[in-house]
Image (cartoon, rainbow, N blue to C red):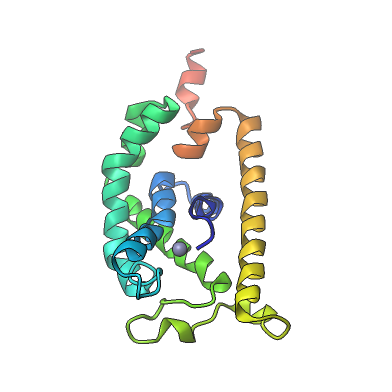
């Protein structure tokens, strides 16, 4: 995994491709698969710490369902109280609609897409293909010159740097437009042409 929150910038960029996407659905979806990591450490430490939720089958089913439940029921409560954002607006973007479900699903998939190139093993096709047979392309790129662990370290560091730079850029743009936390957690504020006409 890249450090889990570093999945945010990718989810945010996807949200920019269509206004109908729910940013919260994408964001929660993009971090959900990593909740299996501590569970694997504690309960199944003889297995890889990325397994079920990092497989296509697990991500498309349990992963997406978890993202829907967490975004619908926990996200609005936690984000509105932590960042003092309007509950109604959060409830609106976390309402269960086809686009909301699609956002959660695509968010979870975006996690797999970002993890895959930089990881030295990938359970994408688990349980049919052994995770240790699927080496990420970015790791493969450095393997002729380095050990697999060093190649993984370089691939992971490069991914982290790219995501941090992106996040700084995204944050700066939100900050200059105003309503930083609203844009970060809810999405772009709705434009209100009617209110402008009324001079409100
Ligand atoms: Zn991960």
**Relative vertical location of residue 123 with respect to residue 74 in this rendering, above or below:** below
Name the outermost residue toward the right. Answer: 145
Near-viewer residue (132 or 173): 132
Residue lying at 67% horizontally and 56% vertically, measured from the top left: 161
Measured from the top left, where is residue 119 in percent x and y? Answer: 54, 72
Residue lying at 50% horizontally and 63% vertically, measured from the top left: 1
Measured from the top left, where is residue 59 in percent x and y? Answer: 34, 67
Q: Which quadrant would residue 78 be assigned to in this image? A: top left
Q: Is residue 183 left or right of residue 123?
A: right
**Relative vertical location of residue 146 with respect to residue 32 in this rendering, above or below:** below
Residue lying at 65% horizontally and 38% vertically, measured from the top left: 173
Measured from the top left, where is residue 87 in percent x and y? Answer: 33, 28
The quarter of the image that holds ligand 1 is: bottom left
Near-viewer residue (7 or 38): 38
Residue lying at 36% horizontally and 64% vertically, measured from the top left: 41
Name the outermost residue toward the top. Answer: 199
Near-viewer residue (57 or 82): 82
Measured from the top left, where is residue 196 in percent x and y? Answer: 51, 19
- Residue 97 seen in this snapshot: no
Q: How many marks?
A: 0
Near-viewer residue (11 or 51): 51
- Residue 2 seen in this snapshot: yes
Q: Which quadrant would residue 140 be assigned to in this image? A: bottom right
């Amino acid at each position: 995994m890249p450090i889990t929150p570093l999945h945010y910038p990718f989810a945010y960029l996807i949200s920019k491709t269509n206004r109908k996407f729910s940013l919260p659905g994408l964001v929660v979806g993009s971090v959900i698969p990593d909740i299996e990591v501590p569970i694997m450490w504690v309960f199944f430490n003889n297995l890889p710490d990325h397994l079920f939720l990092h497989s296509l089958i697990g991500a498309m089913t349990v992963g997406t369902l978890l993202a829907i439940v967490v975004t619908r029921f926990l996200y609005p409560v936690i984000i509105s109280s932590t960042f003092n954002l309007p509950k109604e607006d959060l409830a609106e973007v976390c309402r269960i609609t086809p686009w909301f479900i699609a956002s959660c699903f695509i968010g979870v998939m975006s996690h797999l897409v970002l993890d895959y190139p930089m990881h030295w093993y990938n359970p994408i096709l688990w349980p049919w293909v052994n995770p240790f047979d699927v080496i990420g392309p970015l790791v493969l790129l450095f393997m002729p010159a380095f050990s697999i662990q060093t190649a993984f370290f370089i691939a992971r560091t490069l991914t982290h740097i790219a995501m941090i730079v992106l996040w700084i850029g995204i944050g700066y743009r939100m900050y200059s437009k105003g309503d930083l936390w609203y844009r970060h957690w809810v999405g772009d504020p709705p434009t209100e042409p009617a209110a402008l006409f009324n001079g409100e």
